[in-house]
Image: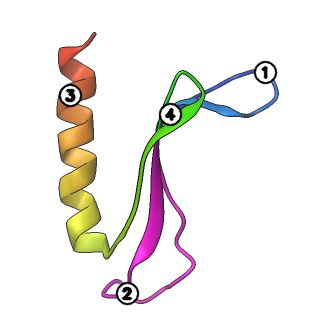
Amino acid sequence: MKTDASGKIKDGIFMDFKNKNINEKNNYNIYKNGKIIKSGAENLSKFQNIYMEYREKADLNQ
């Protein structure tokens, strides 16, 4: 995750773990250039797949 000087997320992926049960859905956001480009709610297992896909795409774009 990359942030600016004020701590605002510029690029990255973030999941808010409000629900501590791994089977419960939590909200996540994907950021690019300081804007949310994708949002959703998934359980931890499904989010892991989303995270891996995000990382693979990020690695290809570097």
**What is the three-letter code of the residue carrying label 2?**
Glu
Mark 3 surroundings within 10 Å by alpha-carbon count, few (fewer than 14), some (14 through 19), many (20 or more):
few
In three-dimensional space, the C-alpha distance between marks 2 and 1, rounded to whole angstroms, equals 33 Å
**What is the three-letter code of the residue carrying label 3?**
Lys
In three-dimensional space, the C-alpha distance between marks 3 and 4, rounded to whole angstroms, equals 14 Å
Q: Which residue is mark 3?
A: 57
**Any mark on residue 24, and which?**
2
Q: Is residue 35 above or below residue 40?
A: above
In three-dimensional space, the C-alpha distance between marks 4 and 2, rounded to whole angstroms, equals 24 Å
The answer to which of 7 and 41 lies nearer the viewer is: 41
Q: Earlier in the sequence, mark 3 or mark 4?
A: 4
In the picture, measured across the screen, residue 19 lies left or right of residue 7, that is: left
In the picture, measured across the screen, residue 12 lies left or right of residue 43, that is: right
Q: Is residue 13 visible?
A: no
**What is the three-letter code of the residue carrying label 4?**
Met
Mark 4 surroundings within 10 Å by alpha-carbon count, few (fewer than 14), some (14 through 19), many (20 or more):
few
Name which residue lies at 78% across and 21% down: 5
Pair 4/2: label in front = 2
Q: Which residue is mark 1?
A: 5
Q: Earlier in the sequence, mark 3 or mark 1?
A: 1
**What is the three-letter code of the residue carrying label 1?**
Ala
Q: Earlier in the sequence, mark 4 or mark 2?
A: 4
Name which residue lies at 25% across and 35% down: 55
- SS of the residue under disc 1: loop
- SS of the residue under disc 3: helix
**Any mark on residue 1, and which?**
4
Question: In this picture, which residue range is highlighted in magenta?
Answer: 14-30
Task: Pinpoint residue 61: horizontal percent, then vertical percent.
Answer: 24, 13
Q: Is residue 12 above or below residue 23?
A: above
Residue extending furthest top? Answer: 62
The answer to whether residue 19 is magenta is: yes
